[in-house]
Amino acid sequence: MSDSVGSAPAGGPRGPAPVPKGMRLQALAWSVAFLAGLGLAVWGHQTLRAATTPRPIPPHPESIVTLAPSVTETVFAVGLGPSVTGVTSYCRYPPEVETLPKVAGFSDVNVEAILRLRPDLVILPVDKTATAAELSRLGLTVMPLDTRNLEGLMHAMTELGAATGRGREAELALDRIRSAIAYAREKARGKPKPRVLFSVMHSYAGVGYISEITAAGNDGFFSNLIEICGGVNAYEGRLPFPTLSREAIFQLNPDVVIDLLQNEADAPDAMKGWLQLGNISAVRRARVYIFTEESDTVPGPRAWKTIRKVSDAIQPDPPLPRGETEDAGEGGSEGPGFTAVSGAPGVVTSNSGALAGTVANSAAPGGTSGKAGALADSAASPAAPDGMAGASDGTASGPSASAPASESL
């Protein structure tokens, strides 16, 4: 008998066995899962790329948030002040920032407050990497600036000006700094290089008794100023902001001391403290200077003023013969940015004429033996955040501390 139409011949090849319905559904589910996973992977890669790829800087930003005093001053210096909508609680200059919303403190950043301002540009110090990454993930445009040293500051001003169409304004601000550098280098040409200790914060064991200081280390903003102005840093270690004990100060034995204070009211006690270190060269030669201008504590565009003051302190005009001192006279005398203090020949404060005579005979130089102990960094202060050099919480340790003086340089 012949096979029925459409049937396979007897003994011939058979077609594939039908796939059970359950297996077909499982295969379909695996296919859907694979395609979904592939889609998620592509989406995730694009999202990660968007979060990690720097967004272009808007050429004409309309809302700028700044997260450090030096950054704020730099933004204003290049003519972008009208666009600033949020700053930190430590920003003081120019005066108009006082009325702006405060979106950050010393080390804390209020991300929600920043988002509410809807900025098209957030500018912050280059070392605030975690904050920059978080803000970028939230879709904000972030621009880090490096103002930790003078070269970085000048580059930051150029970079910001070029990115926002404010190159001319940036150059005008830079010309002041370049002029001050030229002034300092010319004044120091061919002269001996004194060893300079730059103090940025105190810790007091008692009123007028310095127990330790936070000093400016090497390869930072203040160390740059020492070199430009014809000195060498008395501290030769590698810490950015070393904490130096009283004994360490004696062993360093600097030729010049420059002390930064944010609060002028602390100047008399600070002066008493230095006068008690009478065996160090800076006190013997009346080469202790206290700066109390707020601009001296911020590595920003007003650095030109600080450079000239540091130059006049390190390389006085006319030069002092070694071993001689400047006589302040009875009532104090005015110099280039300094006021001499009556009763303490040559020990001077900057821009604080009201202090003349307040430290008279407060402490006799000497009275403490020098080289009382081996030089040691008693503690390594972290790299100071902008505007607040020294300990990470912005205060010095000890029973009584002076106001923190300088800026994540």
Image (cartoon, helix red, strand yellow):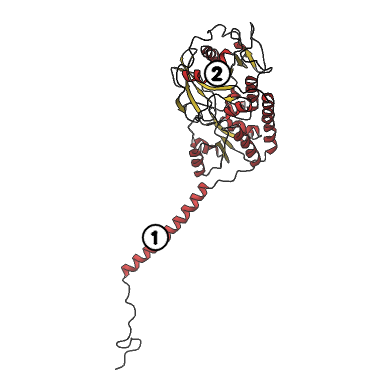
Instruction: Name the disc covering residue 129, or none.
Output: none
Instruction: Name the disc covering residue 263, or none.
Output: 2
Q: Who's the residue at 61% across and 24% down the image?
A: 231
**What residue is shown with label 1?**
33
Q: Name the residue type under label 2.
A: Asn
Q: Who's the residue at 34% across and 66% down the image?
A: 25
In the image, residue 238 above or below residue 196: below
Q: Position of residue 375 (x, y in %)?
A: 47, 22
Quadrant of the image occupied by residue 268: top right
Q: Quadrant of the C terminus?
A: top right
Q: Position of residue 376 (x, y in %)?
A: 45, 24
Depth check: give the residue in front, 354 or 41.
Answer: 354
Depth check: give the residue in front, 270 or 364.
Answer: 364
Q: In the shown orientation, is residue 21 left or right of residue 74?
A: left
Q: Position of residue 278 (x, y in %)?
A: 53, 12
Mark 1 vs 2, N-terminal side:
1
Q: Secondary structure at mark 1?
A: helix
Q: Secondary structure at mark 2?
A: loop
- Please indicate, yes or no, whether residue 100 appears anywhere in the rendered image: no
Depth check: give the residue in front, 392 or 238.
Answer: 238
Question: How many discs mark residues in the rendered view?
Answer: 2
Q: Name the residue type under label 1.
A: Ala
What distance separates the C-alpha of mark 1 from that of mark 2?
A: 66 Å
Q: Quadrant of the N terminus?
A: bottom left
Q: In the shown orientation, is residue 399 left or right of residue 231?
A: left
Q: Who's the residue at 53% across and 48% down the image?
A: 53
